[in-house]
Image (tube, helix red, strand yellow):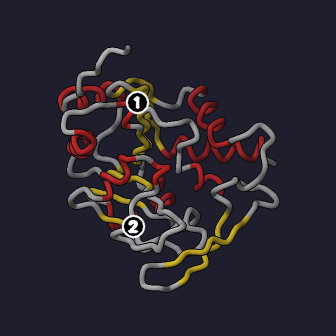
Amino acid sequence: MPARRMPIDSRQLTQDFERLGLPPGRPVMLHASLRKSGPFVNGAEGLLQTLISYLGPLGTLLMPLGSEDDQPFDKDCSPAEADIGALAEVFRCFPGVQVSDHPAARFAAYGRQSEALLEPLPLHDYYGPGSALERFSAAGGWVLRLGADADTVTLTHWAEYLAVLPHKRRVTWHYLRADGRRQSIESLDDSAGIVDWPHGDYFAQILIDFIASGKARMGQVGYARAECFAAADFVPFAVRWMQSHLA
């Protein structure tokens, strides 16, 4: 029987962020597995509050929320997509968090640059030019991953728009809003991928190869392996990778 884990307190978490080399005062997009990285004192709220405090008054915490496409969408009431994880739903309900009004690209943010990152978002091509991902990159954002699966780097979708490739796959998504309106939204295919790759999930391979390049900072936060890296390093790498492997 595995040993019982002791909850990680705020002091230990802060030290872990410092050792990892996560820069405070920046926009940070978080991907985390609570099961792998915790438990934390005060649970998921304890993790979020400690990270927000660590980032400081100049920092902003950003998380993708998504939405369940089989339910009418309401910006403020629709729960986060279950596949994204429990932490996203806790963050959505966190006091002071702002949420973007987009059924296909709903993000939550807390901090100084929340409004600048989230409003307004383009209806179509919501991960492309003018998106929260482009703004996050332009603002000097960093990605923080705590025990997250290798295919979990939402920022890769911005690289898909920048990569020069023939025949990128496009799709149309259909949503019902809580007020009864129906919306059809066009974008690159962010579900099955913009092209077929014979070796499986290219999102995961891009991250694996990026980490191997030495540009990510590696360590441990809580009980999980952790990585953090600058959007300014990751996005150009992902673009080059796609143009080399997916063309």
Q: Position of residue 22 (x, y in %)?
A: 35, 35
Residue 7, quarter of picture: top left
Viewer-side residue, 167 vs 140: 167
The residue depicted at 40 percent of the width and 45 percent of the height is 30
Viewer-side residue, 104 vs 176: 176
Residue 157, quarter of picture: bottom right
Counting other residues with Cα less than 10 Å from the Cα at mark 2, is it few (<14), some (14-19), or many (20 or more)?
some
Viewer-side residue, 93 vs 218: 93
The residue depicted at 45 percent of the width and 73 percent of the height is 73
| Mark carried by residue 98 | none
Q: Position of residue 104 (x, y in %)?
A: 53, 66
Screen quadrant of the N terminus: top left
Q: Circle 1 — which element? A: helix
Vertical relation: 5 (above or below) 173: above
Q: Position of residue 49 (x, y in %)?
A: 21, 45
* Amino acid type at mark 2: Ser
Viewer-side residue, 25 vs 60: 60
Question: Which residue in the structure is indicated by mark 2?
Answer: 78
Left or right: 51 in relation to 193: left
The residue depicted at 66 percent of the width and 47 percent of the height is 239
* Amino acid type at mark 1: Lys
Vertical relation: 41 (above or below) 177: above
Distance, label 1 to label 2, CA atoms, is 26 Å
Question: Which residue in the structure is indicated by mark 1?
Answer: 36
